[in-house]
Amino acid sequence: MPGARPRRSVPRARLGKVFAPYLLSLPAGLWLLILFLIPLVVMLSLSLQSCNNATGACVMTWHWAEFGQQLSLYHSQLLTSFYFAGAATVIDVVVSFPIAYWIAFYGGNKKNFFLLMLLVPFFVSFVIRTVVWSFILSDQGVVLGTLKHAHLLPQSFHVLATGYAVVAGLAYNYLPFTALPLYVAIERIDKRVLDAAYDLYASKRQAFMNVILPLTMPGLFAAFLLTFIPALGDYVNQQVLGGTSDTMIGTVIQNAFLTNLDYAGGSALSAVLMAVALIGIFAYARLLGSTAIEEYL
Amino acid sequence: MEAALPAIELTGVIKEFRTGHDVVTAVRELDLTIAEGEFFSLLGPSGCGKTTTMRIIAGFEEPTAGTVSLHGRDVTGVPPNKRDVNMVFQSYALFPHMNVFENVAFGLRRRNVAKDEISRRVNEMLTIVNLDGRSHRRPRELSGGQQQRVALARALVNKPRALLLDEPLGALDLKLRQAMQVELKRIQREVGITFVYVTHDQGEALTMSDRIAVMNEGAIEQLASPREIYEHPSSRFVAGFIGTSNLLAGKASSVSGGDAVIEVGAGERIVVGTRDLAIAPGTELELTVRPEKIELSAERPAGPGCALRGTVTEVVYLGTSTSFTVTTTTGADVVVFQQNSALAGDLASRGDQIWLSWQPAHSYLIGQSAPG
């Protein structure tokens, strides 16, 4: 019968329409559940357990005081982390804004090439890149050695094993995470809006402050998150480039887990870091006016 | 009292764009004087240089040669933010992060106008463009027509010496566009500011303008009133670009007392005014007749008019009128519009033999036909 086939396929099509969104979000949902939500719950529960350092066996003791203890023990490292990550983020924004602006406005048909150039360092492993920085910044390395040889710097001058080196390393490693969201935001700006600003008596500076910058805010917010948060928990830069005096919280957590086998302490410290970062982000969003941000996202 | 200075004066303006080794001339040797309070249109197809001309007036482009004066002051080389003209952009270019009030107040704020004066002038302008009560909306919460009026208000609130409008109605649908044409004309009368209007839409230009400059390939083909441009196109290009027109080619057979008799095809004769053109018998000429000036009749009409015979090849009903395409015995296709008035029946149908006739005054010589 010619009429039978289409009639049977109607309910199936409708069923597909209902389930398609769920099916499509299944891989991402599973990914989030298995690799993010479950570990997060495990971590939070671990931070409330007491562990035997020798055997590694843990028992749930609802030890809430762990958070406070970790915070009082390591608050200076936590502060250092905020300080370093903040400095690196500010440097990244200042450095990458002109880059992103230039590519978006003047990149012409070579835009993709310039973006690729930004990403080229990413083809090398994170740790290797950082180690190479330690060569570049070493006391008798290419930069300092040459400058010292030319008597432009005193022999005692050093960068490696200081906070400056850590901030430089962080800024270098996370630059693309700042530049790319900024680029996306600037690229989306209708260039005629700039013409309109000039037409309405705005100087270049006023056009930038009143039009470009506000329209870049959502990108700036994304850039901040993508740079500051990973930099906050970073421990590679500090260990390779930093000294022993300015330990970052990432190193402390890493030591807790891998050296001291203090799973409860490490988990509690991670939870504290997460909580502080989240509070900071919400305060920051509120400060910038989250409604204004939402409007463009 | 001295004579009023022209609002805008372009003298010998040339604009060349360089792309690699190529030089593209967008505007060639343009002289243009626009009077104070005039509604002036730059009309032409895309790529004719009309937008470039406007951007030169606004200061976004510097002319390769020539000067731009605003009210007698030479502003060549002065950046756009220091010129006393404002622009309404094609896609409005409203500031998306500001509400209607802030958009309109932008120019006044840059000029450090006092706060209460800003709010007074902005609200006044929002009333003129019928946007009261919408001052807190964001541009994207407004319809296309409303955005258009915000763009207009944002420019007009600064009381510029001239307002430049770059195809401002292009993005609107037909109904709204027609309403806005009337609206624009009203606003222009109300504020008394010189409007320079760039468009490729001849209907728009004819409806609103005091004068029109028809541009083609970077030069002005004709600069005149809408009626003059429509009735008396100065070139083949203008005749073809403005409205529908019928071009007839022929040879002058005799010239006497300001009239020329043109032979179009075998034995068919048309009378046309020579204007001031020196026409010798035997010259190849082109003339134009507007479709609505032609009468259709079954018999050869009596009287001194021009008449041609032909066969109806197409009939298109257009509502208020009907369009007939008639292939004349001379081989030319002539379009005729007939009003569908109460009296008009079915004048002719496809395949009918018919006579076309018009008054000699309505055939208009547009010069010698191109050689070759």
Image: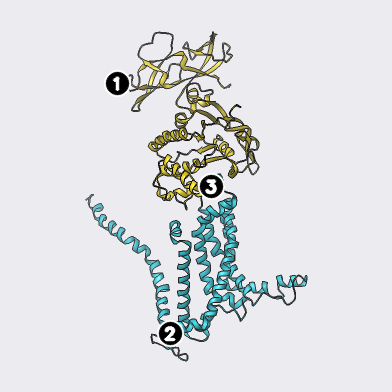
Chain colours: A cyan, B yellow
SS at mark 2 in the image: helix
Q: Are callouts 2 and 1 both on one chain?
A: no
Give the label, 2 or 3, closer to the camera.
3
Residue furthest to the bottom: A54
Residue wearing tag 3: B113
Residue wearing tag 1: B342
Looking at the image, residue A78 sits to the left or right of residue B147; the answer is right
Q: In this view, does A136 lie above or below B119?
A: below
Measure the alpha-carbon separation of dots 2 and 1: 96 Å
The x and y percentages for residue A164 are 63, 73
Q: Is residue B17 above or below residue A73?
A: above
The x and y percentages for residue A132 are 64, 72
The x and y percentages for residue B96 are 47, 51
- Residue type, mark 1 in image: Ala
Disc 2 + disc 3, Cβ < 8 Å: no
Chain under numbered label 3: B
Measure the alpha-carbon separation of dots 2 and 3: 60 Å
Q: Which is more toward the observer, A78 or A219?
A: A78
**How many numbered marks does the figure carry?**
3
Residue B148 appears anywhere in the view: no
Residue A65: numbered disc: 2
Give the label, 2 or 1, closer to the camera.
2
